[in-house]
Image (cartoon, rainbow, N blue to C red):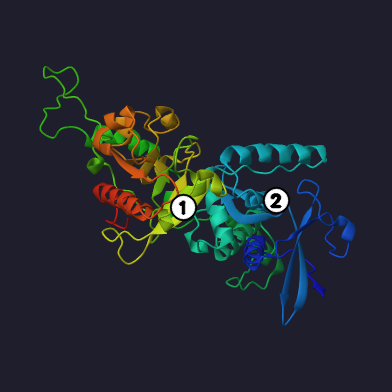
Amino acid sequence: MATTDGPPSDPLALLRSSIAAGTLPILTTDPDPSTAAASNSSLAHASYLIFNTHSAQDGSQHTPIPLTQPTRFVSIAAGTKALDLRSVFFCWQNKDQSAGTYIAATQALNEELRQAGKSETVTNLVFAEKLDLNQWLAGDIAEEESEFIRSLDANRAARAEAKDAAATAKGGEDVEMRDADLADGAAAKREKERLKEIYAAERKMGDRNTMLRGAKIQDFSDVRKKYSPVFFGKSRGSGGGPPGGGGQQQPVPTLISNPALRPPVKAAQPGRRPEPIILLSPSASSLLRMPNIKTFLEEGLYAPPDSGTSSNILHLTRTLPSLSPSKPLRFILVDDPASFRPDYWDRLVAVFTTGQTWQFKNYKWQVPAELFSHALGIYVGWKGELVPETVKGWGRGVMVAQIDKGGVRWRDREVVEEVWRGIEGRMKEMGWGKEGR
């Protein structure tokens, strides 16, 4: 049995491989794995994660890593902060929790850390960062597809640049004078001092990407939403005279009423397609909720909503021939958009509704007519029952699907295919499948 003598350079990779192998690391207060009394500690009282690995060449290895060690995951919402291992492990432990439960658990853990006399705190990740981290740890996405995980090469380059800059600013003693062939010791010393002053005054220049973009990712989607009607919504045939002119200015039409005029959704990174989002109703009267929606849409089989395990985020894949005949599209299903980033609303393609307007109170578009001009509305009810008048009043933006009551489920697949045809048709109208979408 072997034990490593120092912390490894990449705890993220160790945690991902441990999850893939089904052997999660052990929380402990002591880096020595033989100390049984220090094992199985709570996350607040523990100081280390011990990773147990085994190989034919090296045998069993126990790798202790401090929970305070920074990782390669950078939280943009926290000010481009490198996330510590405790926050990463806590996020994985709460991967299936809703946003409200996760926030409450974070606050409770920070209080436990304070009572334990520790100064560190656990970072509460926003929806997009939590989803990205858990998908990467589970192996659902490759490292280069993550928006927030720095590569090992980038880390090494950043550390080397920082070391060179610090040495230059300090004016260290490692200045090489290969071009100074001075026999006189005093002259050589003067030349050395002169070069040190020159090097200390130099400023390290970056490449064009560093100068133009900077180290922090900027999100200008809110600016685009605010000013798109101003720049693209004006009628080209109107006079558009200067303020105070005699002609009456034409009103600026809004873009939200016409999905064909909205800018196309583009991938967050080159080569990575955006994942369309489907919103579900959180109402208890809804026939389709998080516990049973995946079985319904993937397998074509309806089951009562209380027959499955509830989760706040689900994923499913579906081949839509007119949009992506060779590669299935990956959909995200959620019932609470409270943690949405602004650009997530551009990826919304369908909304399941029961006809209750309170469902839209946290939406970007709270007026049903406006909402269903951006995404397809879907009402699913029992066959033979009346469709609510509110749903009928919403017009063609909402499709109605009805499933059979009782234990006979042979028509479910037919209803599911009808729902998918509706979603595919609306996505095609919105421009999905074009320009890398």
308 relative to 378, above or below: below
Q: Which residue does the numbered mark 1 point to in the structure image? A: 294
Total marks shown come to 2
Q: Amino acid at mark 1?
A: Lys
Describe the element under mark 1 as helix, strand or loop.
Answer: helix
Depth check, mark 2 against mark 1: the one in front is 1
Which residue: 32% across, 54% down? 414
Cβ–Cβ below 8 Å for labels 2 and 1?
no
Q: Which mark is residue 86?
A: 2
Q: Residues within 10 Å of mark 1 (few under 14, many from 20)?
A: many
Q: Amino acid at mark 2?
A: Arg
Q: Nearer the viewer, residue 130 or 244?
A: 130
Which residue: 21% across, 28% down? 252
Q: CA distance from mark 2 to mark 1?
A: 32 Å
Describe the element under mark 2 as helix, strand or loop.
Answer: helix
Residue 55, percent across and down?
71, 78
